[in-house]
Image (cartoon, helix red, strand yellow):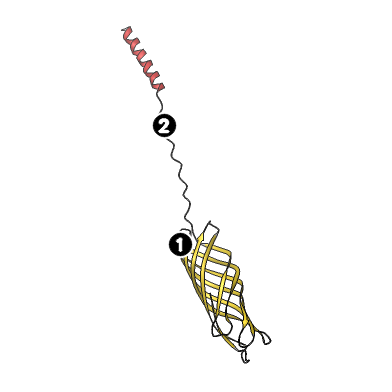
Amino acid sequence: MKKFLLAALLASVATGALAADLPTHKSAPPPTPAYIAPPFSWTGFYVGVNGGYGFADLSKSNFGSSSGGLIGGTTGYNYQIGQFVVGVEGDLDWADIDRSGVNAIAPYKTDINTLATARARLGFAVDRALLFVTGGYAGAEMNASYAGIGSQSDWRSAGIVGGGLEYAFTNNISAKAEYLYAPFADQTYFGGTPAAEKSGLNRR
C-alpha cells in the first residue's frame, strides 16, 4: 500500500513538472492594417500661370494674319461628381501677337496685347488625368496703325470654345495643354478715310 501511494505521488509530481515545461499557446497579434490613400479628387480652387502661342487671322483685311506669344495667370474652381468634373475658369494674358508690313495704302502694324477669357469646363477624370471641353467668353485688345495716318485701338469680344488634357502630378500641382478658338466679330478701322479697313479676327 505504501509503495502504491508513493508511486502515485511521484507520478503526480512528474505530470505537474511536464505540464509546466510545455509551451504556452497565445493568440498571434492582429495584423497591422494596411494604409490605403484616399482617391484623388479634382474638387477645389486653384491658381496658376499659363503661356503659349496664338494666331490671329485678320480676314477681310489688308493687314494679313499675325502670331506671337502670350503669358499670364489663371484661376478657377472644379467640383468632381463621380468621374465627371465641372468647373469655371478665367485667365488674363499679356500677348505680343503682331504683324507689320506694307500694303497698297502704307506701312502698317497690328498688335493684340491683352487677352482675357471666362469659361465653363466639363471634364471626365481617370484618376489624375482629366479630359475636358471648355467654352465661354473671350476678349482681346487690338491696335492697328498706318504710318503717316494714325492708330486705333479697340476691345473686341467673342465666344470661345476649346478642349484639352490636364494631369495632376501631386495633390497641388498640375499641368495642362489646351486649344482655344474664338471668332471675333468684324470691326472697321479708320472709317471714313482712304485707309478704312474692315477686319474679322479669329484667335487660336
N-term-proximal mark, 2 vs 1: 2
- The kind of residue tagged 1 is Ala
Mark on residue 125? 1
Q: Looking at the image, is 33 positioned above or below residue 93?
A: above
How far separated are the C-alphas under marks 2 and 1? 49 Å
Q: Quadrant of residue 10?
A: top left
Question: In the figure, is residue 141 to the left or right of 35?
Answer: right
**Are the residues flagged by discs 2 and 1 in contact, CB closer than 8 Å?**
no
**In the depicted view, which residue is nearer to us: 3 or 204?**
204
Residue positioned most to the right: 148
Mark 2, Cα crowd under 10 Å, few <14 / some 14-19 / many 20+, is few
- The kind of residue tagged 2 is Lys
For image coordinates 32% across by 7% down, the residue present is 3
Q: Position of residue 87 (x, y in %)?
A: 50, 67
**In the depicted view, which residue is nearer to us: 20 or 190?**
190
Q: Nearer the viewer, mark 2 or mark 1?
A: 1
Mark 1, Cα crowd under 10 Å, few <14 / some 14-19 / many 20+, is many
Mark on residue 61? none
Q: Which residue is mark 2?
A: 26
For image coordinates 49% across by 72% down, the residue present is 162
Q: Position of residue 156 (x, y in %)?
A: 58, 80
Please say whether residue 143 is visible from this viewpoint: no
Please say whether residue 114 is visible from this viewpoint: yes
Q: Which image quarter holds the N terminus?
A: top left
Q: Position of residue 171 (x, y in %)?
A: 53, 57
Q: Position of residue 147 (x, y in %)?
A: 67, 85
User: Circle 1 sits in a helix, a strand or a loop, which is it?
Assistant: strand
Count of all numbered marks drawn on residues in the image:
2
Question: In the figure, is residue 152 to the left or right of 76?
Answer: right
For image coordinates 40% across by 18% down, the residue present is 17
